[in-house]
Amino acid sequence: MTEVFDAVDVIRAKRDRQSLSAGQIHWVVDAYTRGVVADEQMSALAMAILLNGMDRDEISRWTAAMIASGERMDFSRLSRPTSDKHSTGGVGDKITLPLAPLVAACGVAVPQLSGRGLGHTGGTLDKLESVPGWCASLSNEEMMRQLEEVGAVICAAGDGLAPADKRLYALRDVTGTVEAIPLIASSIMSKKIAEGTGALVLDVKVGSGAFMKDTESARELARTMVGLGQDAGLTTVALLTNMQTPLGLTAGNALEVRESVEVLAGGGPPDVVELTVTLAREMLAAAGRDDVDPADALRDGRAMDVWRAMIRAQGGDPDADLPVAKETHQVLAPADGVLVSLDALGVGVAAWRLGAGRARKEDRVQAGAGVEMHAKPGAEVRGGQPLLTLHTDTPDRFPRALEALEGAFQIAPEGARPGLLPLVIDRIA
Ligand code: URA
């Protein structure tokens, strides 16, 4: 096949701050997927994009080219509308688990293609795999049937979905080019658009435990993704939410499933309940169903019924005991006072080092490992009371986890008022 462009010309153009043409973008993404553009050439281009940026048209074309590299799913034959949520990733972010059945219980189907965790943020599939018997892989036909019969599916994205992104993301991971807003936005949105959902709510995390450490860059990422969704004809809304401190009281796979089930049973930590209900309202409204209140479906057990059906449909046993780690270690409050901070990154890295996450794609995770929190910022604590419980099957991991927690929490004298960010910082539509 004769190639219509030359990779070096495309790299030079972006190096020299030019806009890439539609033809150049479609060719370079396609040729990289075919193996004609080499990894070192794509790395140079990714770095040029990170340094010099892309305009809205370029990002839109780049996204379209990544979608075109694979299959596109279509749920338009379903008897109900579809809506999905994507989180940019955080510590203790188990929201998808109660959210998908909750939205399904309100009449909108949720086709959620998820990933596994890499680094300190957990992956939804790793969490669900701690439920005995549950299986992440479904064929497209099984997914469609489950969406029609149960209303919610959480499963692994097949290899056919945006294969260009799979290659490019792995390359960015090892070339210091993950943090480019055009590349993050096109990576996330190409998968969500190819997934075929009718509406999308983005949960863009801000803070130490998130990709985006400050509100301004989170807002820029959110605006870029909302623009891409709207250009593709997808109703898209983004919330900027707080990831300065972990969500809920657990970080770790089975620990987070347990907490999610508590939320579905009408209990659970207030921040997890608030974010679940807020995102459910957005997902329902984006799918044209702002006439139903998800808080009712959480309260009356309908969301729990869908959860149980969703777990069963994928071979899981919703009544089975969840795995528990073999060893625990408590971290005690050093003094009386008010817990004014509990750093998401510190807790996330500790959970990861305890075995809840993986350093390489091939690593296995420990289902029971993680961090349980006994207080959240704003709470009064007494010296000597347990602040955190660390869980692992391999106690030689405790020292490195404890190192990650050094300086990760602060206790101020009684009466101190921590300056906490709200849970939902902004909404972009
Ligand atoms: N998640 C993705 O899927 N892609 C990125 O580039 C960053 C986060």
Image: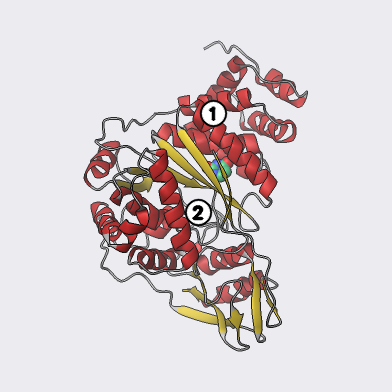
Quadrant housing the C terminus: top right
Sequence-wise, which precedes: disc 1 or disc 2?
Answer: 1
Q: Amino acid at mark 2?
A: Gly
User: Does any portion of residue 136 appear in the rendered image?
Assistant: no
Question: What residue is rendered at 24% in x and 52% in y?
Answer: 313
Q: Amino acid at mark 1?
A: Thr
Q: Which mark is residue 279?
A: none
User: Does any portion of residue 59 appear in the rendered image?
Assistant: yes
Of 344 and 236, nearer the camera is 236
Where does residue 296 sit, x and y in percent of width and height? 32, 58
Task: Report, in whole angstroms, how far the alpha carbon at label 1 lies from the one at label 2.
Answer: 23 Å
User: Residue at the bottom extreme?
Assistant: 384
Query: Which residue, given by chain and number where applicable, does mark 2 sit on?
Result: 117
Q: Quadrant of ligand 1?
A: top right
Of 36 and 189, nearer the camera is 189
- 10 Å crowding of disc 1: few (<14), some (14-19), many (20+): many
- Helix, strand or loop at label 1? It is helix
Figure check: 105 above or below 260: above
Query: Which residue, given by chain and number where applicable, does mark 1 sit on?
Result: 63
